[in-house]
Image: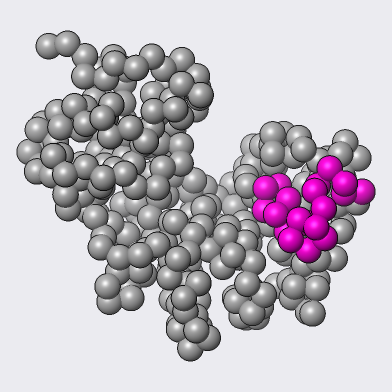
Amino acid sequence: MGTLFHKEIYDWPTWSSILQSIEEFSPLIHAIFGRETLVGSDQLALLTPATNAVFRAGNYVVKIFAPEESGVGTEAGYELEVQSTRRAHELGIRTPKIVAASYWQDKYLFPYIISEFIEGEVAGQAFKKFDHTQRMPFIQALKSNMALYNIKPDQEIDASGMRNQAKMNHRWQPYPESVRRQAVALIEELDLSHCVSVHGDINANNVILDKNDQLYMIDFAESSFAPAWYEYPPILFDLFDHDQAAIQAFVADVDHPDAVGMLFDGLLLHDFGADYMREIYLRHTGKTVQEMRDIYEIRNILDEILNG
């Protein structure tokens, strides 16, 4: 039998250019569903992609991970997502059940996960329509789920890799060199001694509300061990879309002596923190980060958000 996937993949641009193509992935998904004895591969619809190709297939969601040739390095992410999603189930967190997870060898080796499809709305869209009486229960439900997941590891965590990754994060590149040096120095001093298990990317698209307003968390591919405040940047600045009242409500009962410093540290450490800082700076000053002269400008803005 010939190959089912025909495009050439040799870097991120060649992968990203086709990861939303139903036409290209349809034969591959049909063969995978045949092997897994599942139906629905003839009912494909595109879902929100990120690094990997994600489609709805009838009552399922199928995620095809980028092959090694893309340079993305998703092998570890695939294993991590399978393990972390199953662990979330064990902890009592609502997340779509994985019905199949394996590899398909074609022109390239494709890891894949098939999970149940949850009929509902991504929380980022739902949250925009909520009034105050709806937002507070949602925030509490989200924090309850996080409390189940944010538990201490059985052994001590070596945080050096996380710290180095944050210091070398390519998302700092648009910033002036002086600000980048500030960021690196501050990251070097972060207290990473109290790590817990974190989802890592609780953004507008990774929480779903079903038709009964039950909250589901999805996409555990960024799970790791980090301080609990590592979770906060994507929640506050993507899921809540910078809404000041929601940010204040979320942070109000967080057990930390310096809430502003905690959020500042979270932005410094988070993989997408530099991107969130860029948006925060633009919204509050009207300027790009290329015009930033001192990274503490961000800390001052956070102070205004929490205490203004």
Magenta stretch: helix, strand or loop mostly: helix
Name the one closer to the observer, 122 or 83.
Answer: 122
Image x and y of residue 183, in percent: 81, 45
Give the image quarter of residue 69. Answer: top left
Q: Residue furthest top?
A: 2
- Residue 229 x %, y %: 63, 62
- Give the quarter of the figure containing the N terminus: top left
Q: Is residue 289 magenta-colored?
A: yes
Name the residue rendered at 32%, 73% in the picture: 214
Q: Position of residue 145 (x, y in %)?
A: 43, 69
Counting from the top left corner in percent of width and height, residue 147 is at 48, 69
Q: Is residue 279 above or below residue 303?
A: above
In the displayed orientation, state which residue is furthest to the bottom. 133
Observer-nearest of 25 and 107: 25
Q: Residue drawn at (27%, 20%), measured in percent from left and top?
A: 5
Residue at 14% from the left image edge and 36% from the top image edge:
33
Whether residue 19 can be seen here: yes
Specify the quadrant that holds the C terminus.
bottom right
What are the residue bounds of the magenta stretch?
274-293
- Which color mode does the image show? one colour
Q: Is residue 12 left or right of residue 189?
A: left
Residue 179 higher or lower than 264, as above or below:
above
